Amino acid sequence: MEQSQIDEKYMRRCLQLARCGRQGAAPNPMVGAVVVCDGRIIGEGYHQRCGGPHAEVNAIRSVKEPELLRRSTIYVSLEPCAHYGKTPPCAKLIIEMGIPTVVVGCRDPFPKVDGRGIDLLREAGIEVRVGILEKECLWLNRRFITFHTLHRPYITLKWAQSRDGLLDRRRESAEEPPARLSSPVTQTLVHRLRALNKAILVGRRTWELDRPGLNVRLWTGEDPQRIVLSSSPVCCDSVATDITSLLTLLYEQGVQTLLVEGGAQTLQSFIDQGLWDEARIETSPQALGDGIPAPHITGKKGEKLLIGGHIIAYIYKNS
């Protein structure tokens, strides 16, 4: 097996491990690390929670025979950090442990890292190979990377529509119940999605008609910050009068992810301004016949799931 194939094999394992930190690592990136000696894995780790040890630290600590580190290779899906934050720099730990080779999936765009970890390792005489499964590594942390490169949260649009492309019946008051287009199972998955986002937004009309809880009562995790897009005051966590100012404020607050749940006018306003990164669209087997049309969106088609007659499709913005 060629070296490039070997590197990809272990980097795929790093990606598998990194995904285990999906809910706990934020706002830090998801990172996985693998220590290999003589063709076998002797240590593994991932970043489990913000403020806790990084993936490299956990992988190194898991090695039962530390003397093997001096002839091992450590694979890590994201560049090792080179600064003191909540934890010491991983690049310095790798140097101290005498690991001779480091294989990195992609560079870390965080300003305090951004190549400094790689430079530090190379200056210490360590062989560093960079860019192994780079596309996959960047994609895994697209939320973190979007925040640090575009200086705004990663924006996910979410809606449920009938099979004839409608969001809801036309309603004039809160006394008229909304159309129920999600099943109990897909509704639970919505709450899982909420748990993965730090803020959630609806428009004023949705807030006034439905008074949505916008919480994660059907899942585990922290409730996202609730935001209503409105030109007039409403009783909620916070109110935003325009999208651009809101995104600037959320960036300044360190909010990396924003989930937009509707309705049609609010969703379309994000789409029209090009301020979105992915859309999660649930299509119900139910038809409404007449009502409010779903937003119009175009992009790169992604995953598609079939759950009890409901189709959940993902669309990603073309970069």
Image (tube, helix red, strand yellow):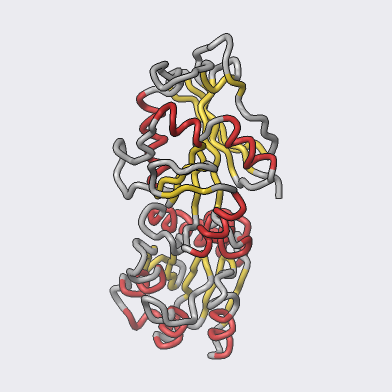
Residue 24 visible from this viewpoint: yes
Report x, y in % for residue 269: 64, 39
How many numbered discs, if any? 0
Q: Residue at x 37, y 69 (%)?
A: 59
In the rendered image, the vertical position of residue 309 relative to residue 34, given as above or below: above
Query: Residue lying farthest front?
Result: 232
Report x, y in % for residue 80: 49, 74
Q: Residue at x 65, y 40 (%)?
A: 271
Residue 2 visible from this viewpoint: no
In the rendered image, the vertical position of residue 167 relative to residue 248, given as above or below: above
Query: Residue lying farthest bottom?
Result: 124
In the rendered image, the vertical position of residue 98 relative to residue 46, given as above or below: below
Report x, y in % for residue 165: 60, 19
Can you tell which quarter of the image residue 26 is in?
Answer: bottom left
Observer-nearest of 153 and 24: 153
Q: Residue at x 60, y 77 (%)?
A: 115
Q: Residue at x 50, y 83 (%)?
A: 100
In the rendered image, the vertical position of residue 106 relative to residue 301, given as above or below: below
Observer-nearest of 181 and 225: 225
Observer-nearest of 319 and 100: 319
**Quadrant in the picture for the N terminus:** bottom right
Q: Is residue 276 left or right of residue 30?
A: right
